[in-house]
Amino acid sequence: MANGNGNGNGNDMDLEPKSGSDDHDHDHPTAITNLHLCYSQIILRVLAIASTLAATWIILTAKQSVLIFGIPFDARYNDSSAFQFFAFANAIASAFCFLSLCFLIFLSTRPSSNTSTPLNFYIFFFFRLHDLLMMGLVLSGCSAATAIGFVGKYGNTHTGWSPICNHFPSFCNRVTASIAISYFSVICLLILTTLSLHTHH
């Protein structure tokens, strides 16, 4: 009987370390996944900042002067309210994305007692709301600039608007590049919004 009790106690003692090991193995992949998601968010925010900043700089410096029938004409971004809105939208998005990046880095370096959920619901709600608002702002600026750019390149025969890109090719090329880079930032912000949802769940 003594041996039986001894064996029973020995089996119980053997089971306890295995249970702790299983819990540790279960938490380890979760921590690695959250770390990868955090790094992905940092990289995407850096890309969004760089692309919106580049789009802002290109559109602000897009200008060209030509002579048409001996008369000087200038093409600048501030000649169109749509291009002005596009420039301001990208500048605002770049600034807010930089602030969110600083906030994310601060939170990621802060020690957390729960490795499976390093950021609570309210913080992820802030990031998700921020990314949605910035994506909507940049996308609306891109849409406005694309519409005016299309008219500038191809004109509109119904309204009698003639295309101007044949007279201002350098200006139109810079505007096109700026819009294309800004659309790339929209993609980054869309992925960020998806990652925020995935990380929360």
Image (spheres, helix red, strand yellow):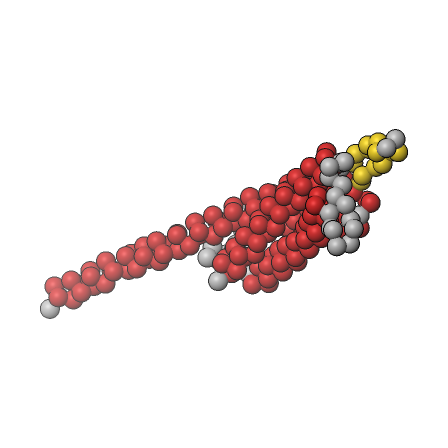
Residue at point 80% right, 48% down? 80
Number of callouts in the render?
Answer: 0
Q: Is residue 104 above or below residue 4?
A: above
Q: Residue furthest bottom?
A: 1
Residue 48 seen from this side:
no
The residue lying at 61 percent from left, 50 percent from top is 186
Q: Nearer the viewer, residue 198 or 161?
A: 161
* 161 is higher (above) or lower (below) than 171: below
The residue depicted at 44 percent of the width and 51 percent of the height is: 33
Q: Position of residue 86 (x, y in %)?
A: 73, 49
Quadrant showing the N terminus: bottom left
Residue at horizontal 39%, vertical 52%? 29
> Is residue 12 visible in the rendered structure shown here?
yes
- Between residue 47 and residue 82, name the one nearer to us: 82
Relative to residue 22, is residue 87 drawn left or right?
right
Query: Which of 146/115 is in front?
Result: 146
In the rendered view, tell whether residue 69 sits above or below residue 186.
above
Image x and y of residue 79, in percent: 82, 45
Say left or right for 71 vs 136: right
Q: Position of residue 167 (x, y in %)?
A: 76, 36
Vertical position of residue 86 compared to residue 116: above or below:
above
Residue 128 image position (x, y, % from top left): 59, 59
Q: Residue furthest right?
A: 71
